[in-house]
Image (cartoon, grey):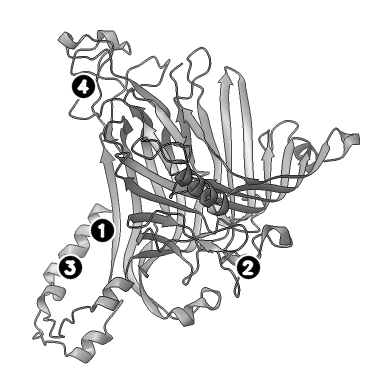
Amino acid sequence: MLVLGSFAHADLQPLDDAEMSAVQGAGFVLDGILLDGSGATITINDINNAAGQNVPISVKEFYLGAAGSNKGANLNPVNIGRLDHPFEITLGKGETLRTLRDDGQWVQTTPSNLTVLEFKFPERLTGAGGQGCISGYAAAGSNCSSRAAERVDLGIRFDFQVAAGRTDIINLDISELVMDGSYLRLWGDDARGQLVGEARVNIFAKSMQLMSCAAGTANCTTAQEQAARTITLSNAFANISLGYGKSQPLLFDVSSNGQFMLELPNPVTRAANGSARPQAERNAIASDFYANAPRTNIVIDSLRAGSGSFSTGGYNFGYNAVQGLSINYLRATSRDL
Amino acid sequence: MISKAWVMSTVLLAIPAFAEMQPLDDASLSAMNGQGGVYLSGEFSINKDGGVLWSTPTSNNPSTWTSSQRSCATAGASTPENCGMRVAIRSEADGGWYVLDNLKGVFSFEGLTLRTRTVNSGFNGDGAGFNQDVLEFGLPNEVKFKDGSFAFGVANQGGWQNRALSVANGGNPSYQQTNIFSAKIDGTIRMQGNVLVFPQN
């Protein structure tokens, strides 16, 4: 009532062109966030076994909090995203969006003259202000914008009720997780008549632990028993790149007979409308693709199964890496069994 | 929660506004920000007892349903179940549909807040340089779910059709829907913190 009653005498000022064009989207910062799903029962269904029976998956011990939570035992709120490097939802022009190439150059990957809807995690920083993406592990790079206090611990446990009396468990705990530089970009492709996009998923973690038993149950109580049933990935990071908008957009289709299809088309063979391309054009597209398309890297500095010591039944697989992977063609479809 | 809201609104209505209203000048107007806010508590119930499109049959066998019946029980369940809301989206001119199906349940929260806030300090040193107003969504401490469920799948038609019935009986044998997964949520999820939103260029 009060609001309606008071008259606003201040003059409304029109925004000039510079001010209008300056506002393109919204930034988000999560301030003091803590999620804890331990009080809820979440069940995932519709995943069937070979006999067509539902295998219910219970989601337990889901948490997200500040780093140093000791696998969720000591949850504290955390800030995610920085005021000057927040999460963003923007409508941008294809020619202004940039992607960080592995050699530290910013390149355009989206086609020009298009409006692109972008969901973006906190940006990566080249030069001043860049933070080590994994503390104490320089090989993960130092171009993250999130600082040590802005990283999270995240955990989730899946209980697969495989059969009566048998439950298989996967318990995942990630510490000091940061996903800077991840994004999803979507736009409409005229010639294909469909929604296309490109995605980048960056995951940097100090450690990821996959345990195959529920803490506190038989043979899963002491630290030694738990370690024996754990796969530990230390100093692990992945840069997963799906799609290169200029010549190989990511197509997420549902086919007209109702099946899900994920496709990365061959960048050179056909134009989007299906017509063949001349040799010179194919060469030009291929050189651009090999020079600029973001690559996929998966690096695990130390991979250990069990305690890592052979004498106690564990094994240390050491350093494992897939680097510079480029996907030339991918097509995955669902099929009804 | 409802009674609290009632008391609040009654109090607001009961205070007679005797003070004469003064227009605010430009200076006072521009000095005002972040002085108010909204505190929301609520309970939503979506299709808890089934929707308007389908009634619940007595068995889980689709060939026994009439053209207006559908059960959304999971595979192998013994009793039929109501179906929730359905949203279908097609992202390709001649393609199939993404389906968010069987969305139903009771969802309640206490204390979702919405206000503006000036951020000019804190945030590990970032606040002072930022010095800007933000919109603050304060998450409720606890969100309660009761029989919440949804399914995500893909289909060749936007609307659901019974493939076990002939076209003459109101079905469509060529209808194809594949559920990728479905989820059920019961209980309380703790959600603490604020989401700050601000324009970005």
SS class of the residue under badge 1? helix
Q: CA distance from mark 4 to mark 1?
A: 36 Å
Judge whether A152 appears above or below B37 on screen.
above
| Spatial CA span between label 2 and label 4 | 57 Å
Mark 2 and mark 3: Cα distance apart in space? 53 Å
Q: Are marks 3 and 4 in contact (CB under 8 Å)?
A: no
- Of the image marks 4 and 1, the number of the one nearer the N terminus: 1
As drawn, the label of residue A131 is: 2
The x, y position of residue B17, in whole percent, is 10, 78
Q: In this rendered view, identify the residue nearer to me: A11 or A246.
A: A246
Residue type for callout 2 = Gln
Label 2 vs label 4, nearer the camera: 2
x and y, in percent, of residue B67 in the image:
18, 15
Dot 3 lies on which element?
Answer: helix
Residue B11's disc number: 3
Q: CA distance from mark 3 to mark 4?
A: 44 Å
Establish whether labels 4 and 1 are both on one chain: yes
Pointer 1: residues within 10 angstroms few (<14), some, or many (20+)? few
Q: Have a look at marks 2 and 4 and say if they share a chain.
A: no
Query: How far is the residue under mark 1 from the one under mark 3?
Result: 11 Å
Q: Which residue is mark 1?
A: B4
The reply to whether residue A293 is in sight is no
* Rendering coords of residue A240 (x, y %): 56, 47
- Which amino acid does the dot numbered 3 rest on? Val
Frontmost of labels 3 and 4 is: 4
Residue that numbered label 4 is attached to: B55
Mark 4 or 1, which is nearer the eye?
Answer: 4
Amino acid under disc 4: Ser
State which quadrant residue B49 falls in.
top left
Q: Foreground: A144 or A67?
A: A144
Q: Residue at x 15, y 85 (%)?
A: A11
